[in-house]
Amino acid sequence: MTSLVMATLLNASLLSATADTYAKAHREATDGKPLVVFVSTQWCPPCRQMKKTVLPEVRRRGLLEKVAFAVVDPDRNRKLAQKLTGGNQAVPQLIMYRRTAKGWRRSKLVGGQTADSVQRFIQTGIAPEQPAEKDVLRKDDPQPKPTAPGTQPVTRETDQ
């Protein structure tokens, strides 16, 4: 019985994040971990289902320890949610930011998800980045040119 109470409290603390916990997760992301943000509301049935069953299962599988994780409720922190989602008001959303050699990469899942789909999403984000075929240099390729001074790396965005 005690373990059930502890598991319930752990899940409640996991899913009751505030702007402070987002800030902490953001700091962890700048230290190298991918940042995964769960954008959800209290009134959304798929959000509640994910909080109740999917995210605890993903945590049990050990995946949330491999990323910086935060929950953002757009009803409580509208400005942050708008920045993270690019204005897309659909909930739930899982958004991952990952630092790559070419800048920050953003991926997201929109709508209710299973533990398996969230697991694949996170595993993709924590896997070492493989160079695209066009990024692989061959002996006869010209040498790459350095980025012009004052330019920023391009951030790729993928929606899954």
Image (cartoon, rainbow, N blue to C red):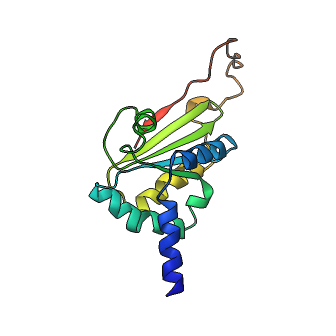
- Residue 6, horizontal then vertical, whole percent: 53, 77
- Residue 45, horizontal then vertical, whole percent: 27, 59
The quadrant of the image that shows the C terminus is: top left
Of residue 41 and residue 129, the one placed in the foreground of this image is: 41
Looking at this view, name the residue that lies furthest to the top. Answer: 149
Whether residue 146 is situated above or below residue 42 in the rendered picture: above
Is residue 73 found left or right of 100 in the rendered image? left
Is residue 159 found left or right of 147 in the rendered image? left
**Can the viewer see residue 58?**
no
Of residue 12 and residue 156, the one placed in the foreground of this image is: 12
- Residue 61, horizontal then vertical, whole percent: 54, 68
- Residue 92, horizontal then vertical, whole percent: 35, 50
Q: Give the residue at x 39% y 67%.
A: 52
Whether residue 136 is situated above or below residue 115 in the rendered picture: above
Looking at this view, name the residue that lies furthest to the bottom. Answer: 1
Whether residue 81 is situated above or below residue 60 in the rendered picture: above
Whether residue 83 is situated above or below residue 20 in the rendered picture: above
